[in-house]
Amino acid sequence: MPRLNQQEQTTFLETPGILLRIACVRADGSPLVTPIWFIYHDDAICFTPRAQSEWFGCLKHDPRVSLCIDEQNLPYRKVIAEGSAELVHDLGEDDRWRDLYREIAKRYVPAEAAEDYVQNTIDQERALYRLPMDKATVKSWRMPHEGEDQTGIWHQRYYAPGTKFSSD
């Protein structure tokens, strides 16, 4: 499949309503995957766990993450980013970055309801993490656009040697 170019990737990451699935590691080494809200801000993927969320505990223990952001409808855009999440603001610092949280909320609920959502959850402390894209391993792909080769859209590793779209 074709990779997203930089503008396509930015446009996709700025599309409202698309969830991020964060994979992190529990203290016992087992994986944890959680769908969450996010925002693409200053060339980083930013996300915010509540104090009591299991995945916040995981990140405090081990900041390695794999983030999967994808859509179910055409053109099936996908971005996977792996790296170490950086703690930007710890618990108790919510007032310093609440405006960014308002922007996150506006990506998932109607703008007129976003402030109500923030006010209704204001007593739930949150941390703010980010994964800078320049420090992450990033993979992306999408379905071909009109005029692009429509056959053999999957990576060659998926085709058995000697089959229709194999290069062997």
Image (tube, grey):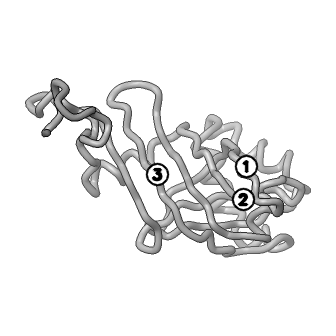
x and y percentages locating residue 112 in the rendered image: 66, 38
Q: Which SS class for mark 2? A: strand
Name the residue rendered at 53%, 60% in the picture: 45
Q: Which SS class for mark 3? A: strand
x and y percentages locating residue 88 in the rendered image: 67, 75
Q: Earlier in the sequence, mark 1 or mark 2?
A: 2
Q: Which SS class for mark 1? A: strand
Name the residue rendered at 41%, 59% in the picture: 138
Residue 62: name its quadrant.
Answer: bottom right
Which residue does the numbered mark 3 point to in the structure image?
80
x and y percentages locating residue 41 in the rendered image: 50, 63
In the foreground, 98 or 151: 151
In the foreground, 156 or 52: 156
Real-space CA distance between mark 1 and mark 2, rounded to the nearest whole angstrom:
6 Å
Which residue does the numbered mark 1 point to in the structure image?
32
In the image, taking residue 106 as reference, residue 165 lies left or right, namely: left
Q: Earlier in the sequence, mark 1 or mark 3?
A: 1
In the foreground, 66 or 104: 66
In the image, taking residue 94 as reference, residue 130 lies left or right, namely: left
Q: Earlier in the sequence, mark 3 or mark 2?
A: 2
Q: Quadrant of the N terminus?
A: top left
Number of labels in the image equals: 3
Residue 56 visible in image: no
